[in-house]
Image (cartoon, grey):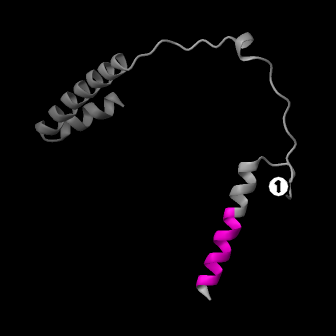
Amino acid sequence: MPLTLGWFAMNAPAGLGLYWVFNNILTTAQTALVKKLVEQDEIVVEIEEVGPRREMLPMASDSTAAAPDWVKASTELDVAAAAGAAAAAN
């Protein structure tokens, strides 16, 4: 990539090469500054504090019988919206 950039810079107007060089320097400096400003300490998770994994809940493939309440509510809203759209189309 640097060789291609150099070849283009040599065969294009001088302003384009200067723009690329200074834009790359500015972008690199800006990226380094932003990374330094938003740098955070690494999060360490202690497995013992989190506790053991829970068993997975079975999910019914063709119905929402074993699904959580929010899935059932979402399905009911989807059905109601589809019925309202069908009624408005007629």
Which is nearer the eye, 10 or 15? 15
Residue 2 position, x and y percent, is: 32, 28
Crowd rating for badge 1 (residues with CA inside 10 Å; few <14, some 14–19, many 20+): some
Q: Quadrant of residue 50?
A: top right
Q: Residue at left 72%, top 13%?
A: 47
Residue at 69%, 57% (x, y): give it: 74
User: In the image, is residue 61 above or below residue 90?
Assistant: above
Residue at 16 percent of width and 39 percent of height: 16
Could you tell me what secondary structure mostly forms the magenta stretch? helix
Q: Is residue 82 left or right of residue 30?
A: right
Q: Farthest residue toward the bottom? A: 90
32 vs 50, left or right, is left
Is 25 situated above or below 76? above
Q: What stretch of residues is rendered in magenta?
A: 77-88
Q: Residue at x 71, y 49 (%)?
A: 70
Residue named by callout 1: 64
* Residue 78 among those drawn in magenta: yes
Please tell me which residue lies in front, 36 or 73.
73
Q: Amino acid at mark 1?
A: Thr
